[in-house]
Image (cartoon, rainbow, N blue to C red):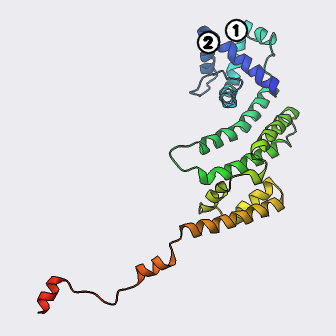
């Protein structure tokens, strides 16, 4: 998997190294009739989202790279001196990785929004990531499998223990009319053991009751507001009219 990414990165880097190469590549895109408004971008190796952008764009121009090789005799030779020429299998690996990273990119966009409430969706997105990582660990591709295991280890470091999660995250989830206690209990049991899920749900219910008691109006104030006065004093104009 890493080799495939390195080979595609090398191809992108070669094309972007000079304006002349980039212009020739654009001509190849036109010849291959590839309709894409984006253009090749090089990633920052330490930032996964930039790698996603690079792979997402590069995989759309696979035919353009093949056409570019026919016009630039140094293209393949230069790549062969490095990580190698991206093969069909490499492009397949890149597309699989791109599809995998797309889920995380979309989740990141949803939970980092600033123009809408995100607290009620945070746990839902968190459980989705947990499912994605567990499914990825069963992938038949060994490199993909190893990558998913490492990602799951980092995920568990911060979100693996349900007991260490803030209860307010669960409260916000339950206050969303679309969510139910049963859903939350099911999601927690999938992320941890059934025993821990039951314990967390009990704590959550107690917290919800406490929250309700905190915000409900006192009984005596409610009664006083609803009671109708039995004696109404006459105002001064009314007393004069009575006389």
Give the residue at mark 2: 24
For the C terminus, give its image quadrant: bottom left
Expressed as whole percent of the image width and height from the top left, the position of residue 210 reads 63, 67
Q: Quick check: 44 left or right of 236?
A: right
Considering only vertical position in the picture, is 80 above or below 138?
A: above
Name the foreground residue: 195 vs 134. Answer: 195
Q: Which residue is rendered at x = 56% and y = 27% of the image?
A: 37
Q: Residues within 10 Å of mark 2 (few under 14, many from 20)?
A: some
- Seen in the image, is 155 located left or right of residue 166? right
Q: Earlier in the sequence, mark 1 or mark 2?
A: 2
What's the distance in space between the residues labelled 1 and 2, CA to CA?
9 Å
Query: Quarter of the image holding residue 35?
Result: top right
* Residue 216 visible in the displayed image: yes
Secondary element type, mark 2: helix
Q: Pick the residue in front: 102 or 176.
A: 176
Establish if 179 lies above or below 28. Answer: below
Q: In which quadrant will I find the N terminus?
A: top right
Residue 147, x across and y down, in percent: 82, 34
Q: Is residue 136 left or right of residue 106?
A: right
The quarter holding residue 3 reads top right
Is any part of residue 66 visible from this angle?
no
Numbered mark located on residue 19 in the image = none
Mark 1 secondary-structure assignment: loop
Residue matched to label 1: 72
Q: Is residue 115 above or below residue 172?
A: above
Question: Between residues 135 and 173, which one lies in front from this camera angle?
Answer: 173
Residue sitting at 69 percent across and 18 percent down? 12
Residue projecting furthest to the bottom: 243
Place of residue 98 in the rendered image (x, y in percent of width and height, measured from the top left) = 72, 33
């Amino acid at each position: 998997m890493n080799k495939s990414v390195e080979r595609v990165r090398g191809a992108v880097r070669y094309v972007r190294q000079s304006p002349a190469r980039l212009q020739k590549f654009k001509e190849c895109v036109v010849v291959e009739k590839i309709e894409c408004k984006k253009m090749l971008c090089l990633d920052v190796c330490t930032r996964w989202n930039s790698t996603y952008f690079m792979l997402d764009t590069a995989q759309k121009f696979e035919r353009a790279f093949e056409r570019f090789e026919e016009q630039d005799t140094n293209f393949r030779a230069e790549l062969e001196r490095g990580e190698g020429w991206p093969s069909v299998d490499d492009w397949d690996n890149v597309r699989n990785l791109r599809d995998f990273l797309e889920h995380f990119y979309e989740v990141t966009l949803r939970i980092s929004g600033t123009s809408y409430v995100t607290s009620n969706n945070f746990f839902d997105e968190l459980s989705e990531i947990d499912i994605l990582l567990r499914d990825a660990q069963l992938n038949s591709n060994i490199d993909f499998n190893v990558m998913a295991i490492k990602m799951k280890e980092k995920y568990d470091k911060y979100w693996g223990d349900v007991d260490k999660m803030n209860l307010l995250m669960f409260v916000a989830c339950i206050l969303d009319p679309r969510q139910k206690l049963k859903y939350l209990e099911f999601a927690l049991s999938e992320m941890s053991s059934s025993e821990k899920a039951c314990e967390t749900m009990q704590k959550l219910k107690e917290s919800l009751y406490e929250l309700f008691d905190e915000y409900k109006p006192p009984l005596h104030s409610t009664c006083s507001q609803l009671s109708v006065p039995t004696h109404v004093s006459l105002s001064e104009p009314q007393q004069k009219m009575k006389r």
